[in-house]
Amino acid sequence: MKRLLLISLVFFTCVAPAFAQNSPLLTFEELLETFKRGYDVKGTFYYAKCEFYVDEKKVENAPDIVGGMNIDFFEYFGRNAAKNSKAFITFSESKMIENPVGSGYVYNYVKVRVYEDGTVSINVRLLDPRTLENKKQERFETKLYDGNLKTAGAYFFVSH
């Protein structure tokens, strides 16, 4: 009996995480509350579903790129907290990657703002790792995923 209990315990300890579910966060309020409670949030960005700007000039076809991040730090700014008319959540990440448009390596700096009306702004910069010179700057504008796969390019999930 003890052996069966031990085998069951080991099985469920090892296998249960494989069945963990990701739950989508469909509103600004859900995202903010999840952050405030300290849960692990992940973001996935489908850039081809976004309005695309290079050096602040709109470009017709956004590239077919998908990016993702674990969000371990965020800040919330209520209305008028920083001269902002809309409340927003912001977070960023910087990773060294192989330069996708040249040779060598660059820092890929991504800053995301999610606004209370469900709009999402994603700023991407490729920076020279030695000088931090800005090599490329892009901005993507989209909506928070609300259940409609065709109109949203920003998806947020909480792991259970």
Image: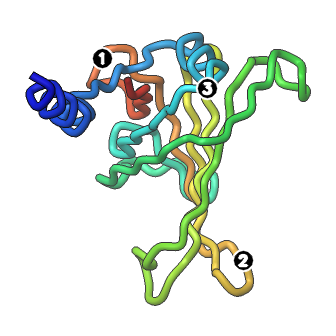
Of the numbered discs in the image, which one, if any, rests on residue 38? Answer: 3
Give the mark, 1 or 2, whose residue is nearer the N terminus: 2
Residue type of the residue flagged with mark 2: Leu
Depth check: give the residue in front, 101 or 52: 101
- Sort mark 2 into few (<14), some (14-19) or many (20+) by Cα contacts within 10 Å: few
Label placed on residue 148? 1
**Residue at 60% across / 54% down in the picture?**
93
Disc 2: which residue: 132
Label 3, secondary structure: give it: loop
The spot of residue 96 in percent (x, y) is 53, 72
Mark 1, other Cα within 10 Å: few <14 / some 14–19 / many ≥20:
few
Q: Earlier in the sequence, mark 1 or mark 3?
A: 3
Q: Residues within 10 Å of mark 3 (few under 14, many from 20)?
A: few
Q: Are marks 2 and 3 in contact (CB under 8 Å)?
A: no
Residue 43 image-quadrant placement: top left
Label 1 residue SS: loop
- Mark 3: amino acid: Gly
Q: Position of residue 86 (x, y in %)?
A: 75, 18
